[in-house]
Amino acid sequence: MMDAGQQETRQAHQRASVKWLLAKAFNNNVPDNIREPFYTDHDNQERLKPQIVVEMGNATLYCQTLSNIYSDPNYQSLNHWSILQTLSRKGVPVAESPEMPLTETVLIQTNPLRINAHMSVIQSLMTLYAKEITSGERIANAVARITGTNGQTLPHDQPFDQLLLLWISHACTSLKKRIAREVELGATDENGVRMQVPNIPAVHDYQSLCDGVCLALFISYYCPKALPWTLVRINYLPAVEDSIHNVSLVSNFCQKHLPYNVFHMNPEDVTYMRNSMKLNLVVLLADLFLLFEIHPAKCVCYPGMDAPGKLLKNIYYSIQFAIFSAIPTFYGIFFFCLFAHQLMSARL
């Protein structure tokens, strides 16, 4: 029997995981009627909405997710057993417990839905997604650009979730150096007070992200205008309200400045994060890596990259310059032709 805290954690994990599944199944455009996948029944219990129960029971959501991850429509017609085999071949076999082996019979049940069995499938899909986003040399290339090195110092043999932490750590370190340069140049806050270089904590594990400091600061590295680092509350021993404030900055940023929302948790879920929520945080970072490094969102503006709109402005000015530069040439040709015409007319 679970206590209230365990029950709350389990529900938070299920809620965030199902939201992630819906986002990927519908290619980040979830229908309004299932954007909130759970409802509260007359016994004050959270229940999955019937449409979602049906589409988990017939594997539709899993097929759509795989199809969108790989941009391959051939995944659209798989059954549960084929999906389990696919995940196993991809290196992320679905974990099953002795009490409930994962079979087609278990997964097609909808009355009641075997939610624990389906959560195992969803977790494997989340792991697969994060691995695919961070595969190859992507993180190494990102770190090399951030640090200005060739990336050889990055331990390639580490698992993808640890490489994501290294990426965040290097981004925060680079941000601190940028702030230090600004302080040396006499940067002041909105009240005219000279700024101080913040003491940014180290990123050791996913638990160290729970106060929201490094989560918010690494976003500020990539999107300094959308999320200024001065909004982040950085304290040696952050209070709970400070942590929730910082994680809320991250949540609000994802909702307002990204092309689609990738923050599927509540701020409190991160602040009070237990081990069961780690994978939800991992896929959040994978989504941010996609939108910061692979397909940069409009708000992304890191050092060495044109600011949002700057490239278009430069193109506009270049065209404008070319037009005005061409005007003297145009008039020169025009008057030359006019003079030649008059000369020929005079000769005739």
Image (cartoon, rainbow, N blue to C red):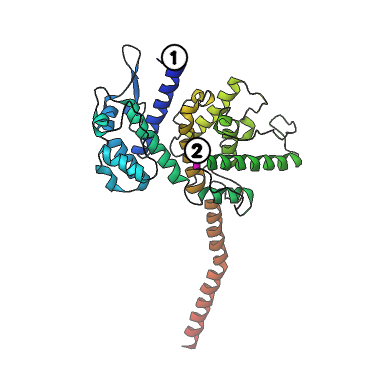
Q: Amino acid at mark 2?
A: Leu
Residue 307 place in picture, x, y as percent:
57, 47
The vertical placement of 134 against 189, above or below, is: below
In this rendering, position of residue 280 left or right of residue 173: left
Residue 90 place in picture, x, y as percent:
37, 45
Tag shown at residue 3: 1
Residue 225 visible: no
The vertical placement of 296 against 270, above or below, is: below
Residue 345 visible: yes
The residue closer to the viewer here, 47 or 274, is 274
The vertical placement of 166 against 239, above or below, is: below
Taking the view exactly as shown, the residue that stands out farthest to the top is 43
The secondary structure making up most of the magenta span is loop
The residue closer to the viewer here, 151 or 44, is 151
Neighbourhood count class around disc 2 (C-alpha, 10 Å): few under 14, some 14–19, many 20 upward: many
* Quarter of image, res 35: top left
Q: Is residue 226 magenta?
A: no
Q: Which residue is mark 2?
A: 285
Span shown in magenta: 151-161
Residue 30 place in picture, x, y as percent:
35, 34
Mark 2 vs 1: CB contact within 8 A: no
Neighbourhood count class around disc 1 (C-alpha, 10 Å): few under 14, some 14–19, many 20 upward: few
In this rendering, the label closer to the viewer, 2 or 1 = 1
The residue closer to the viewer here, 186 or 144, is 144
Q: Is residue 153 magenta?
A: yes
Q: Amino acid at mark 1?
A: Asp
In this rendering, position of residue 266 left or right of residue 55: right
In percent of the image, x 50 and y 38: which residue is there? 285
